[in-house]
Amino acid sequence: MSVYIVSLKITEGSLATGFSVTLQISQEGLPAELEICSQLPAAPHILQQYKLWQTAYLGLRLSTRLESNKAFISNYSRSENCDRAATKLLSSINNWLDADSFRHLKERFLSRLSPVDEIRILIQTENILLQCLPWHLVNWFEPYTKAEIALSKPSYEKEKRSVINLKTHVRILAIIGNSQGINTDLDRCLLEQLPNSSVTLLTETSRKEITEKLWDTQGWDILFFAGHSNSDCHKKTGCIQINQQDNLTTNELRYALTKAVASGLKIAIFNSCDGLGLAHELADLKIPQIIVMREPVEDKVAQEFLKYFLTAYAKGESFYLAVREARARLQGLEDHYPCATWLPVIVQNPAEIPPAWQQLYRQKRESVTNHVFRRRLKIPLVLASSAIATVAVIGLRSLGMLQGWELKAFDYLSQKLPSESGDQRMLIIGADEQDISSNNYKYPLPDDILAELVDKIQQHQPAIIGIDIFRDYPVPSNNKHQNSKSQSYWQYPNVISICLGDSLNNSVAPPPDSPPEQVGFDNIYDDLKITNGQDDHVRRYLLSRSDNPLTQTSYCESNYSFVLQLVSRFFQSRNIPVTTKGNNWQFGSQLVTRLVNGSGGYQKFDDRGNQLLISYRRTPQIAQQVSVRDILEEQDTFDPSWIKNRIVLIGVTAKSVPDLHDTPIGEIRGLYLHAHVVSQLVSAVEDNRPLIWWLPFWGDYLWIWFWSLGSGLIIVLKQNYLYRSLAITGCVIVLSGVCWLVLSQGGWLALIPGTMAIALTTTIIIWRH
């Protein structure tokens, strides 16, 4: 079950003016998944009510464990006064936290977490009064039966440790200080009965002996103190009475405590009175977890808390839940000791993860030599795990099971590449809504209008003209333009028209009387079938198809695509040879590698014919565009220089004529799709714009194995869960970055298989190790 960390950072303010509050929610060892800011209003009355409660609490008759020389008279009315003050203070706190300005933060907390989750709630504040409040009784925490509150400073850092824990027992340094008037024998007995522990007792000792023990090179897991202690009135500093004559402040032990933390000290327990001042100074020394009592505590309450906590913790309960259980069981004492559950508090360094009892020791002792030997044995485990993961991923990939994900990843990385400008070698003439309206040329465009348009274009010396309009039957002239030229535009050898299909049931014939060498097919394939209906994006373009007796099966007999016809003639006009090399087309020195099964993420698809993987130009407008009337009426919006030596594409752009296709760059018309492929091929030859390439099978195998092996080595080198998580996350980020960088140079690397190999390898190693 996940452990959630909830941080309430309360800063920049006071009870008199209000506070700024930041809520963060994260899973243990992972980055924050929610962060939201809010405001708490001013509530100066809470300070007064806390002082009234504190006066009532201190007015009770406590045992001599209280560090006070006052004489107290115990009676029912004083207990009742304390209860009333506590109820009033708690009601004010809950009303304050229910303020309108703070309610949305509370609602996000309640909606984000489940009552069954284990939750550590950190109150991060420097405000002493806020640290004294009974946060565990706040009403919006009540449904969470596995939540416990801790105090923390807003700023913190993790202490670097220099010692590898190879101990067979939990090492506890127990300091029994001035015990006058209190019974510390029970504390000593509880510590000595703990399983798998080794307790070193210092009873009414000296500062020198404590310092020497803290400097022990073997390190301590737990520091315990029982006896008298107190904090100053501001709860900023504190001291412990180590014997009947001497007091000792944490500052006087600073160097020794710093050494103890560096040597592995994880928990400090001060089972004594008024410990917030002690905790404030100890937190500066980066002690990971500290338990203190907020206020003066009665001897019986301190003993019972210690018993309940150590029993639950040593039996395997988590640190926080053990404190929660011990606190809750103190409620049985509150008929004699009011507000006993208010006293224990955890002070946490948020950079640390509280250890379980079993994590404080190794159940089987290992020598350093054996430890090193076991580290060496992990290398074969990494090699075996990475080999298994690589073969498994390659197998899944070859079966096409990763194909849909890989195509989506390819789209995503392509969309993140730098933007490009339009292609200046093309001009698009699009018949828009105004062109095809009944007041103009109508739809479909009449033959004489199209012939006149071609004549006009030819006057300005285009390199090639492509007509992306199906003309399988004659379209008569309309009355308005009955005097337009009607001669066939096929007299021009640089005009290419279009047909469709490879079967009689799905084909459109080329225009009547059009020379076969001036016709290209228009077969656009999406990926709907190969992704089981999940993705209809167009990523492939069929450049040419094999010779077949198509005259018996289709009206569209051309073996060359519309785009191939256009770019071939364009290159020939520039004396660039167009040839074939094996099964691949070659334009000049640029070889266009045919897309086949095993090409990048395409592992299972119909790869018949010579297919091109489209590299869409990342621009909002692929080329200069004008309307039909701009040309025919020679409007000012048209510049004749836009035609000379260019590839001119003629088509319909009116939205009322549907011709849309889903692509990685969004929904575009077929006319623009052809333009993108034309631009891709021409740019590859003339601008060295990279075509998409991919690794051979053995290259993919090595690529996937590299990331699998690398993540496996990280797992065995990093034992800490947080470091492992960050390292593996970093691997995936680096993998994604490399794939993006290589794609910017045309390379399609295996992002999804690499990520899966990382996940599978780390899972196998963690499971086996």
Image (spheres, rainbow, N blue to C red):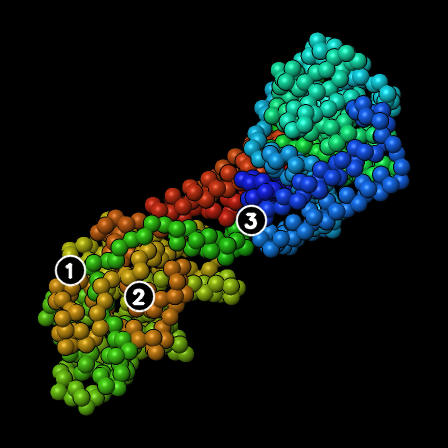
- 102 in relation to 620, above or below: above
- 259 in relation to 110, above or below: above
- Point out the frontmost of discs 1 and 3: 3
**Amino acid type of the residue tagged 2 in the rendering:** Tyr
The residue to which callout 2 is attached is: 672
Viewer-closest of 347 and 97: 97
Viewer-closest of 484 and 718: 718
Nearest to N terminus: mark 1 or mark 3: 3
- Point out the frontmost of discs 2 and 1: 2
The CA distance from mark 2 to mark 1 is 23 Å
- 542 in relation to 756, above or below: below
Q: Quick check: 180 left or right of 543?
A: right
- How many residues crowd mark 2 within 10 Å: few (<14), some (14–19), many (20+)? some
Q: Residue at x 34, y 75 (%)?
A: 655
**Spot occupied by residue 104 in the image (x, y as percentages of width and height):** 59, 54
Q: Tell me, yes or no, if residue 768 can be seen here.
A: no
- 460 in relation to 444, above or below: above
Query: Which mark is drawn over residue 38?
Result: 3
The residue to which callout 1 is attached is: 573
- How many residues crowd mark 1 within 10 Å: few (<14), some (14–19), many (20+)? some
**Spot occupied by residue 566 in the image (x, y as percentages of width and height):** 23, 64
Viewer-closest of 608 and 429: 429
| Mark 1–mark 3 CB contact (< 8 Å) | no
SS class of the residue under badge 3?
strand
Q: Residue at x 38, y 59 (%)?
A: 665
The CA distance from mark 2 to mark 3 is 49 Å
- How many residues crowd mark 3 within 10 Å: few (<14), some (14–19), many (20+)? some
Nearest to N terminus: mark 2 or mark 3: 3
SS class of the residue under badge 1?
helix
